[in-house]
Image (cartoon, rainbow, N blue to C red):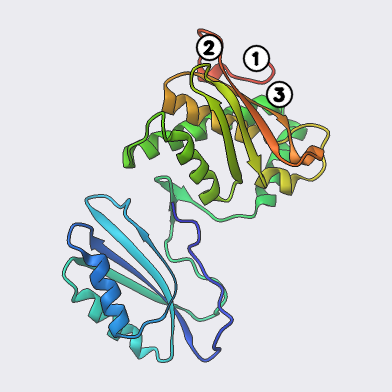
């Protein structure tokens, strides 16, 4: 679930901004060996992350650094490749010293991803609202599909149950830059509310007379439905775009016999 795949550099203009992407076997203690080797070579890590969701027991260690001589890159590559458990090492230089993504194509929740401005996403939402019949239902269903897909992927890579699934959802929202979640959910009645602080949709949308985060409502409903095995409906009742401090989504069980794909604001209240 890596989001920050890039760095801005305004340090020593004479230094080279370099990235290394190290693929390794997770069962051989390679992480500690990598750190030890980097320390011995006096590689100053400006930003780094570990991703152990690679297939076949493989992990990825990505780091950014600044070096003085381009010849050092080959030396670091050779030293890393000599470590027991290292499968491959890729590296590159960001010569413009502004921004550089390491992984292409980017991957998020097991699918190709991209980095875009929230305003671009919201522009699409506005066009849908202006030109599509029942736009709120369409956006809700789109979110529903995304939420179910995210839940399926998460379940395949980590143990998730009723006790921690909402905590995982909170981390997903934070990691993806969507917002900060506060969950008040009663497991007995299968109802409650999800508060989203700093919703990326509401912040980019601007003033509105109606709630605008229907896509998030659908995502939350889809995620909870897939995780808990019960069909939920989620409706946004207050929104930051309307002048409220936060966006509030009410969660409730869907009527008996209702399937997730039947949940539309225009049909179920």
Q: Position of residue 134 (x, y in %)?
A: 71, 23
Near mark 3 (Cα within 10 A), the count class, few <14, some 14-19 or many ≥20, is: few
Q: Which mark is residue 258?
A: 2
| Most foreground residue, 71 or 10 | 10
Q: Is 122 drawn above or below residue 2 in the view shown?
A: above
| Residue holding disc 3 | 134
Marks 3 and 2 sit apart, C-alpha to C-alpha, by 19 Å
Residue at 56% from the left image edge and 15% from the top image edge:
254
Residue at 34% from the left image edge and 83% from the top image edge:
73
Q: Position of residue 104 (x, y in %)?
A: 43, 60
- CB-based contact (under 8 Å), mark 2 and mark 1: yes
Marks 1 and 3 sit apart, C-alpha to C-alpha, by 13 Å
Which circle's residue, 2 or 1, is located before the other in the chain? Answer: 2
Q: Position of residue 25 (x, y in %)?
A: 21, 60
Q: Which mark is residue 268?
A: 1
Which circle's residue, 1 or 3, is located before the other in the chain? Answer: 3
């Amino acid at each position: 679930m890596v989001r920050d795949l890039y760095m801005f550099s305004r340090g020593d203009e004479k230094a080279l901004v370099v990235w290394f992407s190290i693929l390794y076997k997770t069962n051989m203690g390679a992480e500690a060996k990598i750190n030890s080797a980097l320390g011995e070579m006096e590689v100053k890590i400006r930003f780094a992350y570990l991703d152990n969701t690679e297939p076949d027991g493989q992990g990825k260690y990505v780091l950014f650094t600044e070096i003085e001589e381009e010849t050092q890159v080959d030396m670091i590559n050779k030293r890393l490749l000599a470590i027991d458990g290292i499968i491959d090492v890729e590296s590159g230089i960001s010569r413009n010293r502004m921004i550089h993504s390491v992984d292409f194509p980017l991957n998020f929740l097991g699918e190709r991803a991209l980095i875009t401005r929230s305003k671009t996403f919201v522009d699409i939402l506005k066009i849908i609202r202006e030109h599509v019949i029942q736009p709120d239902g369409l956006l809700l269903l789109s979110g529903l599909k995304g939420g179910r897909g995210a839940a399926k992927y998460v379940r395949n890579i980590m143990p998730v149950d009723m006790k921690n699934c909402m905590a995982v959802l909170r981390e997903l929202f934070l990691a993806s830059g969507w917002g900060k979640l506060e969950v008040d959910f009663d497991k007995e009645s299968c109802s409650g509310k999800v508060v989203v602080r700093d919703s990326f949709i509401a912040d980019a949308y601007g003033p509105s007379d109606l709630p605008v985060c229907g896509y998030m409502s659908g995502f939350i409903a889809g995620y909870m439905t897939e995780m808990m095995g019960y069909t939920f409906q989620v409706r946004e009742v207050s929104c930051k775009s309307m002048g409220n401090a936060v966006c509030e989504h009410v969660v409730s069980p869907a009527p008996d016999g209702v399937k997730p794909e039947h949940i539309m604001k225009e049909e179920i209240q």
